[in-house]
Image (cartoon, coloured by chain):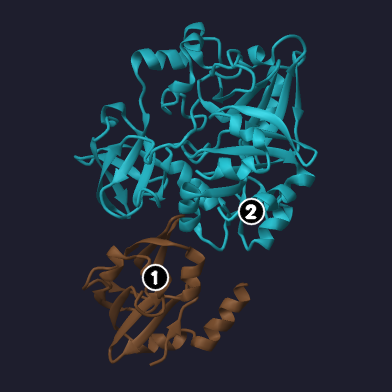
Chain colours: A brown, B cyan
Amino acid sequence: MSKKFTKDHEWISLDGDVATVGITDYAQSQLGDVVFVEVPEVGKQVSQGDDAAVVESVKAASEVYAPVSGEVVEGNGELEGNPALVNEDADNSGWFFKMKLADTGELDGLMDEAAYAEYVKELG
Amino acid sequence: MNAPSDILKKTALHALHAELGAKMVPFAGYDMPVQYPLGVMKEHVHTRTKAGLFDVSHMGQARLTAAEGDAAVLFETLVPGGISSLAEGRIRYTQFTNDQGGILDDLMATRFGDTLWLVVNAACKDADFAHISAKLSGRATLEIEDRALLALQGPSAEAVLAALMPACRDLVFMQAVWTEWEASAVLISRCGYTGEDGYEISIANDRAEALAKALLAHDDVEPIGLGARDSLRLEAGLCLYGHDIDTDTTPVEADLMWSVPKRRRAAADFPGASIVNAQLADGMEKQRVGIVPEGRAPAREGTQIQDSHGTPIGTVTSGGFGPTLGGPLAMGYVTPIHAAVGSQIQLIVRGKAMPARIAAMPFVPQNYKKG
């Protein structure tokens, strides 16, 4: 499946019944140098819009929200030792966590790539 | 609250910031660069290894002249620092205190003859100038100097600036001199707020951009924003007014008594002196300390500090990540029994207790050119 996007600049990519979640390249460029990432624990139940992870730049801490509801099945352990991976490769290896979806229908409410690109453009 | 951007003030370098691709933010009523395309981390490291150019024109500059005699003697009625003892062209760090010993602002004062040149924080400058004018009314004249202020900081600063203003070589840390650059009068002060050697250069607004461009033309110089300015001063253990010091903290609590000489303590002739001396004799309820978290998570301003048993003992006032230190760092206030370097504490970050230690400041060695 192609990626879907939230207004809070998370991306989600579904493969079977497990989705991978990260922040967009636009989000990492706005944050600047990422110095710390806290990913959710495996087994954590999250509802759409809940705080799921934390990303910190030199300047500030930001929340990463769950794009949809479900259960966390894996956190990206790579980010603990190398948080800068979020800056280098936000769209791929800088992913935050994987989750099993409660309701794939929630994905329909998210933006597709073209809609997200338009949304970012409007933000200036 | 930040003012809408259309009523934000602009420094003389505003157009240059845009040209350099800066990301602008509201700060103390000004539209200021928080970072340039290099980014906070690289800007910080560049300043520590080569030289960074900062626009600090939002800060207040003023000249104080006494109606009769030495302005420095009069000025000591407002601050606890040793000002009357300043030699020609020497700079002192001090604070305006109120009658409770609380800090109204911190500042730099430089002696030229019987006058003082003052540099105060942007957010406090209007109040500071009103305070000085009111307290010294009829006895002194305060001339507000609407000039640009550039800071060039880092180990390459001397070599870079000396090519334009050779007089800068003769200065040591906390010394200043008036000189000329391309027929403009400039005040160069060997000081700054990064922990590095460097200068602050006061110049007429209409010459500021030309000077900034001349400095940026050097390979070793990059423009640096407020983001890196904050991480640099935090690593250097320097207070940020409104965060680490304010009217609720005294120079004793803020661990700034190195800036209050014995003569002033004994004379007790500055605002709040009785409270300052009582705290020195009997102790105080809180003390500013450095903090190093043991994990990787930064603890931000407002984070609760607990002892190892979970009892609240204070609050973080500045916290973040130190690019040169290579990890998180913070400063805050704790009860004095927990203030010893090495004491184990915990920081409550997002509801979880994170182990940390009280640490000596500065967090990274200072690199000043002492005389």
**Residue B235 quadrant:** top left
Instruction: Assign a secondary structure to mark 1.
Output: helix
Q: Chain of mark 1?
A: A
Mark 2 neighbour class, 10 Å CA radius: few under 14, some 14 to 19, many 20 or more: some
Query: Looking at the picture, which amino acid does disc 1 mark?
Result: Val
Residue B216 is labelled as 2
Residue found 39% across the figure and 82% down from its top: A12
Q: In the figure, B90 relative to B18: above or below? A: above
Q: Is residue A75 left or right of residue B141?
A: left
Residue B295 is labelled as none
Q: Is residue B100 left or right of residue B168?
A: left
In the rendered structure, are the residues bearing label 1 and label 2 in contact, judged by CB atoms less than 8 Å apart? no
Instruction: Assign a secondary structure to mark 2.
Output: helix
Of residue B185 and residue B8, the one placed in the foreground of this image is B185
List the residue tagged with mark 1.
A86
Residue found 46% across the figure and 24% down from its top: B251
Q: In the figure, B218 relative to B309: above or below? A: below
Residue found 27% across the figure and 32% down from its top: B341
Residue B231 x, y percent position in the rendering: 46, 48
Q: CA distance from mark 1 to mark 2?
A: 31 Å
- Is residue B125 among what the camera can see? no
Mark 1 neighbour class, 10 Å CA radius: few under 14, some 14 to 19, many 20 or more: many
Q: Is residue B119 left or right of residue B142?
A: left
- Is residue B216 among what the camera can see? yes
Q: Which label lies toward us, 1 or 2? A: 2
Residue B60 x, y percent position in the rendering: 67, 35
Query: Looking at the picture, which amino acid does disc 2 mark?
Result: Leu
**Residue B79 quadrant:** top right
Residue found farthest to the top = B267
